[in-house]
Image: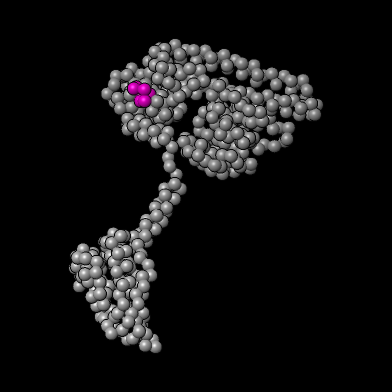
Amino acid sequence: MSKAPVDIIKYIIHAEVEANGLIEKPDLIGAIFGQTEGLLGEDLDLRELQKSGRIGRIDAELKTKDGVTRAKIKIPSSLDMVETSIIAAGVETITRVGPCDAKFRIVKVEDVREDKRKAIVERARNILKTFMSSELPDVKEITEELREDVREEGIVKLKGLDAGPAVATSDNVIIVEGRADVLNLLRNGVKNAIAVGGIKIPPEIEAITRGKTVTAFVDGDRGGDLILKSLKNAGVYINYVARAPVGREVEGLTRKELIMALRKKRPADEVFSELSKEASGASRQRETRRTAPTKKATASEGKSVRRGSRSTTRDHRVGRREIQGRSQRTYDQRDKTRLHSRNRGSESSRPSQEELLLEKLSGLKKEALLLDENLKEIKRVPLENLKKTREVKKAVAVIVDDIINNDLLDLAKNSKYIVGITTAGDLRPPEGKSIVTKF
């Protein structure tokens, strides 16, 4: 007899049989086929249905005890629910198996697809939980990531420096400070910008710009002045200077602001002349401040208590000048001597904390150094990773080979000392924070 394919079985008819006598499995199967033959018409004849595969192989388990045989029967069906129920009802009409009287009873009609449904629902539930528990990216993040990828594709490396794709072929070159500035210019259609990477001007920049019209596009703060001076000291010839609005950075300008700043560029000679005049005026002011404490110290000779008080006052005054930014002053040997003189009252020749911090600054290269309360190193990280570093929150001193700006002050709000190359022009130092700079 044919057997219905397993994958098309829909229902299984479960029946029980009780016969008064000893019967065997062939007798039982024969009774089912024989006594239902012609009972339900040709369309539902069990033999024909089994040949076509719509009824599967009938299985039976028999047990005989005390002259009574009991059996459990399974009849697989691929018919629909109505036809399967009719077949089940027809089986219950059988009254004899071989020579013995028998009683058939349908226990249930099992829908085998229910187990599949349960498995599907359970699997779907697990998939949904996994899908919902995973972090779905924000639409803005996806958009920004795609935009950043597009921008990054436009940046090229020219002798190791980040640059726009038109720098090598253009007769006009714009020098900016960092990679973010190049990206902002690229986003707004300016493709001939190249980044120097800070105030330490790489020697390759002079060769790249040689014979071209060069415009230095700098930030509108103290850092912009330092970039210009560094370019001049490095021997880079500059034709024009463009500046961002006061207190603004090139990387944060809008398209309109970028265009306006480049239109307002000035001849470099005029800008450098103004910077020289400002430096001369600042130098005369420093000389006046430097001689004033000496006269007071002479007048108070022999009065150790008052001398100690004035020393503390001078320390406070120097610290206040450091917070405001010592414009144009180079940290040379005379500065070191003056720092030592502030500690003579304690009869100690050890270097001051400011000196120790500045010494650590000299060993950095585009890095940030985090120190604990004993000025011991906690961690050293590249500048671009500083914002992601958790140790900043517990650092007593934060030293950066960069310009100290308001963003750094916000990041190092828990630190007592913030040390850098110089300070931005719009710096807003909070109370109780010591800012130490090299220039």
Q: Residue at x 41, y 24 (%)?
A: 176
Image quadrant in which the N terminus is located: bottom left
Q: Is residue 299 left or right of residue 203?
A: right
- Answer whether residue 279 is magenta in the image: no
Rendering coords of residue 383 (x, y %): 48, 36
Image quadrant in which the C terminus is located: top right
Locate residue 179: give its quadrant. top left
Q: Is residue 20 left or right of residue 429?
A: left
Q: Is residue 392 left or right of residue 18?
A: right
Locate residue 333: give its quadrant. top right
Against 64, is 280 above or below? above
Q: Residue at x 46, y 18 (%)?
A: 244
Residue 249, can we see it?
Answer: yes
Q: Is residue 423 left or right of residue 21?
A: right
Rendering coords of residue 438 (x, y %): 55, 29
- For the rendered model, the colour scheme is one colour
Magenta-tinted stretch: 185-190
What number of labels is visible?
A: 0
Q: Residue at x 38, y 18 (%)?
A: 215
Q: Residue at x 53, y 14 (%)?
A: 278
Return the residue nearer the eye: 150 or 335: 150
User: Which residue appears farthest toward the bottom when viewing the image?
Assistant: 66
Rendering coords of residue 222 (x, y %): 52, 21
Return the residue nearer the eye: 117 or 55: 55
Against 378, is 219 above or below? above
Locate residue 265: give its quadrant. top left
Against 98, is 333 above or below? above
